[in-house]
Image (spheres, rainbow, N blue to C red):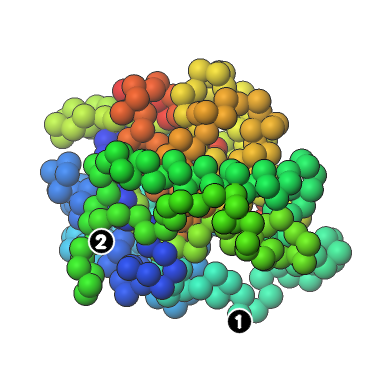
Amino acid sequence: MPDAVIVEAVRTPVGKRDGVLAGVHAADLSAVVLKALAERTGLDPEMVDDVVWGCVGQVGDQSSNIARFAALAAGWPETVPGVTVNRACGSSQQALDFAAYAVMSGQQEVVVAGGVETMSRVPLGAARQTGMPYGPAVMERYDHFAFNQGVGAELIAEKWGFSRSRLDEYASRSHELAAAAQDSGAFDRQIVPVATEAGQVTKDEGVRRGTTPQTLARLRPSFQENGVIHAGNASQISDGAAALLVTTPEKARELGLSPIARYHGGAVSGADPVLMLTGPIPATAKLLAKSGVGLGEIGVYEVNEAFAPVPLAWLAETGADPDRLNPLGGAIALGHPLGASGAVLLTRMIDYMRDKGLRYGLQTMCEGGGTANATLIELV
């Protein structure tokens, strides 16, 4: 079976809700990274077998198969197809899985994986305004629970015994690390500037410098009156896009491209849909079992910071080294543009691995409904 390799990974800056990227349509935002991918690699887009694109809010500006219209917005040939994937927050991580599977099976040779979300223009929950998403059988099975991620995060904090101060300490760490990464230029190579009416956007907008547990202590709980989850220790509502070019080592050589990372393996799992956000724990176990790579061999772990209890519960259950967890900050500081987040995190992780000379990187993403993706990549 052929290997699947990533030869380039790029992303836009991540904008805050109603922030610097709010005026950019999702197709146009996607086009920014698609064009950059072709320009940086010298790839003729005619050679792309498919564009596999993650997007969660597939209504309004993001309806009508955003993958297809992203490719057209990029000026790519009409012969290039596109398909849109929704596995909740893991949509573009799943897009990478699908791209890798297609290449490894020999059915396709050059696939673009990535995703987009413009949460300023398509608010979270917009798809639920026209119907009942879960259906009566599911609601009856789970005793008419509201399936609220914030409530799930509260339940996780309670189950693992995380105090509000512990969660706020973790959230402050995210901002501190993200600010340090920005200042050191760690994101510069991966970010593609986005032209807006107000000028070029080149940096992630959500980092709040000087955030401390003391400043976060002033915020009110968001989901329960005496709860521990609030806006400061949860991921930010964001806009952004990211893309990765996937092919085989042989095709890369033919095209004169140098692979950056090998897709070592992926896993997806389901867990309690009420707790909802614990899926990364079994997904990680499943991935490690099939890969034969030990957790201690892995140099960096990207565990999406949907809410602070999620990576903390993952750490508690896996026994992983906390210093290797989200070393550049995460979604609490840098934002969580749902359908793009998997590709955004992968892009950040790949660059970090290159900078530090790390062989293995593991990424896992909690998802609405209790599913989770886990992906292992190897630097080449």
In the image, residue 60 above or below residue 363: below
Q: Amino acid at mark 1?
A: Thr
Rendering quarter of residue 348? top left
Q: Which of the two discs, 1 and 2, sits closer to the camera?
A: 2
Image point (46%, 35%), residue name: 327
Image point (67%, 65%), residue name: 220
Residue located beneath label 1 in the image: 130
Q: Is residue 190 left or right of residue 115?
A: left
Estimate how packed mark 2 is, as few (under 14), some (14 to 19) or many (20 or more) residues with alpha carbons within 10 Å: some
Residue located beneath label 2 in the image: 201
Q: Which residue extends farthest front?
A: 214
In the image, residue 264 above or below residue 90: above
How many marks the image carries: the answer is 2
Estimate how packed mark 1 is, as few (under 14), some (14 to 19) or many (20 or more) residues with alpha carbons within 10 Å: few
Residue 49 visible within the image: no
Rendering quarter of residue 101? top left
Q: Is residue 308 left or right of residue 238?
A: right
Q: In x, y percent, where is residue 92?
A: 44, 51
In the image, residue 130 above or below residue 248: below
Residue 211 visible within the image: yes
Q: Secondary structure at mark 1?
A: helix
Image point (55%, 18%), residue name: 296
Q: In x, y percent, where is residue 236?
A: 50, 60
Which numbered disc, 1 or 2, marks the residue that appears first in the sequence? Answer: 1
Q: Which of 63/39 is in front?
A: 39
Q: In x, y percent, where is residue 211?
A: 50, 52
Q: In x, y percent, where is residue 149?
A: 67, 59
Q: Is residue 97 left or right of residue 30?
A: right
Image point (59%, 43%), residue name: 170
Image quadrant occupied by the N terminus: top left
Distance from disc 1 to disc 2, alpha carbons, whole Å, reads 34 Å
Image quadrant occupied by the C terminus: top left
